[in-house]
Image: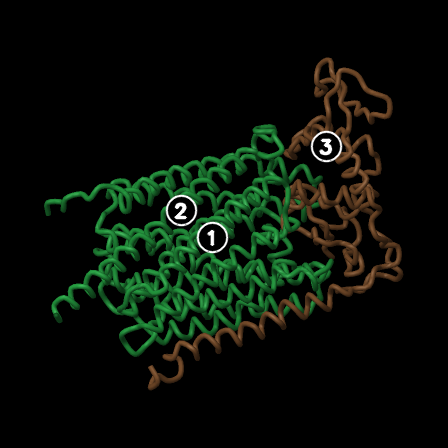
Amino acid sequence: MTAAIAHRQLTAESAGEIESVRIFSAFTITATFWLLLTTAVGLLLSFKFTYPDLGAYQMLSFGRLRAIHTNGTFYGWASVALTGLAFYVAARSSGVQLQQRRLAWAALWCYNIAAVAGTITLDLGISNGSQEYREWVWPVAFIFLLAVVLSGIVVVATVMARAGHDIYISNWYTIGAFIFTTILGITAAIPVYQFGLGQVAVQGFYMHNAVGMWFTFLALGMTYYALPKLLNRPIYSYALGVLGFWTNLVFYPIIGAHHYEFSPLPWWFQTLAIVFSVGMLVPVWAGSGNFFLTMKGRWAIIRRSYALPFFFVGILYYFVGSTQGTLEAFRSLQAIWHLTNFTVGHSHLTMYGFITFVTWGGIYGLLPMATGKRPNVLLVGLHFWLAFLGVTIYVIVLSVAGTIQGLTWANGDPFIASVEAAAPFWSARAVSGTMMLLAHVIFAINVWKMTAGPVEPEPVR
Amino acid sequence: MSERKGMDHVGVLVFSAAGIYAALAIFMGVIPGTVLSKSPALAGVVPLTEAQARGRAVYVGEGCSYCHTQFVRPLAQDHVWGRASVAGDYTYSTPELLGTERTGPDLSNIGARQPSEVWHSIHLYQPRSLVTGSIMPAYSWLFELKDKADPGDVVVNVPPAYAPPGKVVVASRREQDLVAYLISLKQAPLPSPSPAP
């Protein structure tokens, strides 16, 4: 009798386990689809800088595709991949199965329906007015928000069912991310109080918080689990993680106006944003320092791992990109760099160098643990070097191009001089973009190997 | 679960994080948004006509503001684009089109700098026919190519090197609206000397 019950429980448990693995795999696979599609779009865009008459069709035009590239990478790729990882981390760090799995599937559908609808509407020219990262019209934005709310319920329910006493720090960050993004999304998507310059203020708040309160929190939360796990040692300092959580939460929402320096937004409002941009050094250095100190002395392990080199680059570029963000906020530098390609370089340093690299690290590190299927080592290496060199070249050439653009303007040259001066750098950017897209194709092959692909025998050691 | 206290209780974590962030969202998003939405119009800043408003919608749909800003900074290098923008310039500008990139010129005052409809139409059809080195897309889909113009058609006389052989280029309704909007972009004069920021 008791044996029968135990057997039934075991079966239910393993069924739940299998479903959890399928959820993790499905999130990763659909996210990878969006990564491929939207970076192919990005590559086409980069070629248009050198060949402006390439693909001269309305639905392939720069103004239509740019928002598809940015929103697709943000909300199709990074959001979906990081949510899948957040589920896995919540369950593992809580010592229980993923709870509310039906809601997890519903969230996956909502994310993908929003990404499909957002991509189609943007290509038809239906947009929320070129306001970066909230171009999706409000009905689409609300489908995405529903996915965020459902995902948040899954993580909270899983953490509430935890076996131990403490809520592991990863789950602070991820639960925070789902809550903040729900509040942020509602604030941004409701149109009734935003007109003219008021909408500019909301846009500054929104665009920085979408990055900072969503992707940064999800990525840091996952890293706080995966890094100690892969290194097989505890995180250097739990307290630094807690400090990072609260300072991120308080400082980040105040710095949005630094996207509109020298605009007609109230001067004090811009100054406040600059002051807190300096304050951002506290959570950035606390977080990246904590991770580096956890990795210290384990270079032999890092070199041999599939996943840890991605974390190393991700954390390095978190440190570099965010510190750069603080410097960019100073008015003296902003006067030169603002409105130039320097900003585009910065956003790739952070969203790609940091967020995407850490996400890859998480997928290579944790997905094989879930599915028992490993990626191809040679392909992982190729992926790493193409993506690492690709983004590094990308950021360097656009930073130089942006600086030159800003200096030609400051010099009072005719405007077209800034276009001509940047042209060779735009060609180099297209080359680096090609490397990045190649890296993503290789990553997609590895995702297939880690999920749907055949089980391969253990390698002979 | 009941013995769990402080931050190890999920409810406490959820509500404290939500409370702090909601307060910050109100102070940094909702209140500035609401207050600045009521910025009174500068004298001379008027609502768009119907055609201009339709043209603005074309501007939004084609994503023009990814490369063209509509705000002039109080910096020496921006004087070429006009006077520094002020809050009263934007009373009727929803969705806002300030932009964050200047791959092309600022357009706050383009209607004053380039008031010619003909110039704008040729430029939209093929920017490189007027500006060598321009990387702006050619918005050919805003035009119709016809064997010969019908009465009432707005014919665009594209320079021969860029004209489609044997065809005339006719501006669509949308194109005419867009040009009407671009020409409406003229900075109103400030009532008194601009306050130094």
Regarding residue A316, the answer to whether it shows in the image is no
Q: To which quarter of the image does residue A229 belong?
A: bottom left
Q: How is the image coloured?
A: by chain
State left or right for residue A395 relative to residue A32.
Answer: right
Q: In this view, does A233 lie to the left or right of A49?
A: left
Q: Do labels 2 and 3 share a chain?
A: no
Chain letter of the residue carrying label 1: A
Q: Say which amino acid is labelled 3.
A: Leu
Q: What residue would you read off at disc 1?
A: A111
Q: Quadrant of residue A422?
A: top right
Tag shown at residue A30: 2
Instruction: Tell me, yes or no, whether dots 1 and 3 are on the same chain.
Output: no
Q: Chain B is drawn in which colour?
A: brown
In depth, the one of B106 and A23 nearer the eye is: A23
List the residue tagged with mark 3.
B124
- The answer for how far apart the CA atoms under marks 1 and 3 are is 37 Å
Q: Which chain carries label 3?
A: B
User: Label 1 sits on what residue type?
Assistant: Tyr
Observer-nearest residue: B191 or A172? A172
Query: In whole angstroms, how far apart are the C-alphas of marks 1 and 2?
Result: 10 Å
Mark-to-mark CA distance, 2 and 3:
38 Å
Which chain wears green? A
Q: Which amino acid does label 2 sit on?
A: Thr
Residue A165 picture quarter = bottom left
- Label 1's element? helix
Q: Is residue B158 left or right of residue A76?
A: right
Looking at marks 1 and 2 on the same chain, the residue that comes earlier in the sequence is marked by 2
Label 3 CA crowd tier, 10 Å (few <14, some 14–19, many 20+): many
